[in-house]
């Protein structure tokens, strides 16, 4: 309760709260010292550290910009932007940081906005800006279920399931999660197409023309981009094929070493990652293990189960309940903190009710990606909101109310 309260309110920095969890585990002798250290250094924690480090390399080489331009290439009309670009973006966000892609693509969208209203001879088209910002955010967020590499929230769920000896492999997660991603992107595309097609003042939209000009400025791919791309592909292949043997931390550490050998990453680049995020996931893993080992998770799960109506106490109903609970909570606190607080309760609820833990665990992890309502729920929303300003006047085109509506 203390950790969840601090994570949700921000009263204490994330990293200090992560240390506090360990302090309390030591102080109250909940686990032995060596067990606490092991709980903080699980494979899932090494994995999320490696993902953050490789994300730094992708940003440093400019590969994220290259991928963004490649995705936007086919978008010559509004339907092609919505029904081709969005599914491709969602799938990419399953293995590459959605925050980096949103941070690169949103300024391009605002360039397209400025060019389009100028060509149409109008001063402003707020509906177009709102559609750009929200489709980008919601699609990027919806890439989360696609693979464990999409975010630390998935790594935390892997660690929680590992406590019950039910951890899926990387490939098994992808098998269940990836089919959902393009389908959800098409749902988002259809919703915004039907909602905004009559509201737009701009009739002609050619994103690819802006993209071509941006590509010319960046120039051809260089050696570092090629090597980083090959290392990223190698790591993903190893995750899919041998994660049950080498875990998910091993391949990503190998990727970091190779990038360092080719002098694409330096020690200072690794040091520059968001260590608070790593600490958050480490403490969540330790807390999950303590909840499982002491029986506290079963105690909490039993209490929650007794509050649920009969049709939501097992099977599909329980998965729906976990999804709704997580989906609401993730809009008010970070996705990782949400899974850290809710996952250790929902997974034992599944075991107690005779439901497969993957069903409820994956429902919890998937729903934590849907921070669509509040901009505080995920950095992607905050980035898009901050950049959604008229390039000429500086007027804020997208409001907090737009996200909530």
Image (cartoon, rainbow, N blue to C red):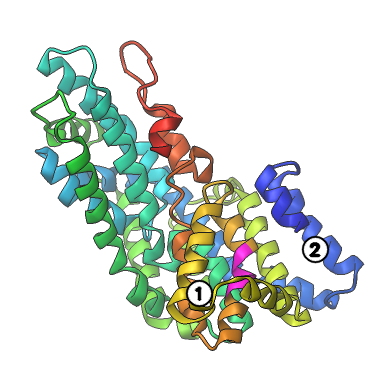
Residue at 70% x, 55% y: name it.
Answer: 4
Residue receiving disc 1: 312
Residue 103 in the image: state x and y as whole percent.
Answer: 39, 38
Residue 98 in the image: state x and y as whole percent.
Answer: 40, 49
- Overall secondary structure of the magenta stretch? helix
Residue 188 in the image: state x and y as whole percent.
Answer: 27, 50
- Magenta stretch holds residue 257: no
Residue at 50% x, 67% y: name it.
Answer: 321
Is 130 displayed left or right of 85 in the figure?
right
Residue at 9% x, 27% y: name it.
Answer: 203
Q: Is residue 46 above or below residue 191?
A: below
Residue receiving disc 2: 22
Q: Earlier in the sequence, mark 1 or mark 2?
A: 2
Q: Is residue 134 above or below residue 344?
A: above
- Magenta stretch holds residue 343: yes
Q: Secondary structure at mark 2?
A: helix
Report the quarter where the N terminus lies: bottom right
Is 27 displayed left or right of 41 in the figure?
right
Write down the region rendered in magenta. Answer: 342-346
How far, Cα to Cα, is label 1 from label 2?
Answer: 34 Å
């Amino acid at each position: 309760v203390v950790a969840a309260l601090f994570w949700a309110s921000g009263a204490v920095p994330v990293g200090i709260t992560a240390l506090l969890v360990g302090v309390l585990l030591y102080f109250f002798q909940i686990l032995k010292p060596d067990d606490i250290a092991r709980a903080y250094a699980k494979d899932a924690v090494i994995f999320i550290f490696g993902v953050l480090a490789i994300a730094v390399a992708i940003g440093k080489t400019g590969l994220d910009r290259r991928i963004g331009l490649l995705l936007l290439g086919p978008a010559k009309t509004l339907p092609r932007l919505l029904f081709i670009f969005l599914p491709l973006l969602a799938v990419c966000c399953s293995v590459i940081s959605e925050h980096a892609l949103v941070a690169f693509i949103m300024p391009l969208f605002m360039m397209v906005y400025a060019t389009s209203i100028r060509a149409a001879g109008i001063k402003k088209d707020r509906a177009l800006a709102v559609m750009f910002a929200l489709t980008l955010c919601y699609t990027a967020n919806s890439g989360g279920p696609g693979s464990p590499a999409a975010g630390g929230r998935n790594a935390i769920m892997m660690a929680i399931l590992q406590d019950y000896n039910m951890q899926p492999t990387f490939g098994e997660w992808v098998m269940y999660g990836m089919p959902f991603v393009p389908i959800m992107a098409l749902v988002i595309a259809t919703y915004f197409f039907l909602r905004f097609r009559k509201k737009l003042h701009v009739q002609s939209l050619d994103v690819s023309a802006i993209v071509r000009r941006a590509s010319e400025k960046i120039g051809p791919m260089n050696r570092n981009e090629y090597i980083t791309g090959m290392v990223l592909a190698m790591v993903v292949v190893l995750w899919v094929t041998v994660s049950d043997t080498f875990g998910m931390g091993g391949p990503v550490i190998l990727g970091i070493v190779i990038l360092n050998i080719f002098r694409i990453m330096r020690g200072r680049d690794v040091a520059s990652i968001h260590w608070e995020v790593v600490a958050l996931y480490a403490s969540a893993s330790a807390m999950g293990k303590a909840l499982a080992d002491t029986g506290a998770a079963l105690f909490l799960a039993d209490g929650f189960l007794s509050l649920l109506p009969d049709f939501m106490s097992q099977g599909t109903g329980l998965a729906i309940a976990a999804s709704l609970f997580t989906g609401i909570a993730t809009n008010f606190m970070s996705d990782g903190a949400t899974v850290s607080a809710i996952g250790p309760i929902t997974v034992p609820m599944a075991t107690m009710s005779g439901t497969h833990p993957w069903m409820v665990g994956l429902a919890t992890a998937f729903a934590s990606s849907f921070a669509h309502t509040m901009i505080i729920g995920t950095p992607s929303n905050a980035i898009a909101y901050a950049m959604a300003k008229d390039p000429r006047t500086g007027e804020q085109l997208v409001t907090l109310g737009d996200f909530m509506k």
